[in-house]
Image (cartoon, rainbow, N blue to C red):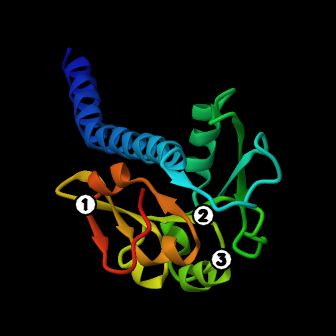
C-alpha cells in the first residue's frame, strides 16, 4: 500500500513540475498565433507603390527569416485565403537569400546580430519589414513587436515606410503602442 502512495506522490510531483512548463508552452504558442494574425492583418493595412506587383492578381510574397514556427503558422492561417484578390505566398528565407522578391519580410529575434545587415539590404525598397527585436526601429525596421506587461504590442516607424514608398493605414498606427518620429505617409 505504501508503494502505491509513493508512486502516486511521485506522479503528482511530476505533474506539478510539468504544469508550469505546459503553461509556458501554451503562452509561447498563443504569442506565436497572435504574431501570425498580426502579420496577416498588417498586409491588409499597407499599400505598396505602383509597380510593386506585376499584375492585379500577382501574389503577395511574405518572407520569414529566423522564425520557421511563425512561417508554418502563417501558412496554416492563410490556406486558400487571398488578400484583395491576391494569393499569399509564404517562404522561409535564409539570411543570405535575396529579399527583393518579397513584399513583406518578418525577421525573427534569433537573427538579432544580423538584423542591421538584413534591414540595410532592403532599405528604401518597397518591402514591409517586421521584427521582434528590442530597438529594431533604430536599425530601420518598420514594425517591431514588443512585450509590454505580458501583452504583445507593436511599435511603428514613420520614417522607414516613407523611405520605402509604403503607405500605412492610420488604423494600424492608432492601435500601435508607439511610433517613431519622421515624415509619415499614412492613409
Q: Secondary structure at mark 1?
A: loop
Earlier residue among tags 1 and 3: 3
Q: Is residue 142 above or below residue 54?
A: below
Q: Residue furthest right?
A: 54
In this picture, residue 106 sits left or right of residue 144: right
Q: Is residue 137 left or right of residue 146?
A: right
Residue depicted at 62% across the width and 79% down the height: 124
Which mark's residue is nearer the viewer, 3 or 2?
3
Q: Residues within 10 Å of mark 2 (few under 14, many from 20)?
A: some
Q: Which mark is residue 66?
A: 2
Residue drawn at (36%, 79%), measured in percent from left and top?
135
- Asked whether the beta carbons under mark 3 and mark 2 sit within 8 Å of each other, the answer is no
Question: Residue 57 at what x, y percent from top left?
Answer: 77, 39
The correct choice, above or below, for 132 with respect to 7 in the image is: below
Chain-order first, disc 1 or disc 2: 2
Calculate the distance from the C-alpha at mark 1 to the C-alpha at mark 3.
24 Å
Mark 3 surroundings: few (<14), some (14-19) or many (≥20) residues within 10 A: many
Amino acid at each position: 500500500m505504501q508503494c502505491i502512495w509513493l508512486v502516486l506522490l511521485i506522479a503528482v510531483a511530476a505533474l506539478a513540475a510539468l504544469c508550469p512548463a505546459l503553461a509556458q508552452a501554451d503562452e509561447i504558442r498563443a504569442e506565436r498565433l497572435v504574431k501570425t494574425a498580426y502579420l496577416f492583418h498588417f498586409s491588409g493595412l499597407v499599400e505598396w507603390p505602383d509597380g510593386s506587383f506585376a499584375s492585379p492578381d500577382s501574389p503577395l510574397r511574405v518572407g520569414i527569416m529566423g522564425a520557421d514556427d511563425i512561417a508554418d503558422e502563417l501558412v496554416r492561417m492563410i490556406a486558400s485565403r487571398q488578400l484583395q484578390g491576391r494569393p499569399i505566398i509564404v517562404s522561409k528565407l535564409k539570411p543570405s537569400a535575396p529579399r527583393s522578391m518579397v513584399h513583406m519580410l518578418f525577421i525573427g529575434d534569433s537573427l538579432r546580430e544580423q538584423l542591421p545587415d538584413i534591414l540595410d539590404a532592403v532599405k528604401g525598397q518597397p518591402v514591409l519589414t517586421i521584427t521582434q527585436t528590442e530597438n529594431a526601429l533604430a536599425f530601420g525596421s518598420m514594425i517591431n513587436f514588443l512585450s509590454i506587461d505580458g501583452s504583445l504590442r507593436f511599435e511603428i516607424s514613420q520614417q522607414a515606410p516613407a523611405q520605402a514608398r509604403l503607405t500605412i493605414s492610420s488604423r494600424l498606427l492608432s492601435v500601435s503602442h508607439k511610433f517613431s518620429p519622421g515624415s509619415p505617409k499614412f492613409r
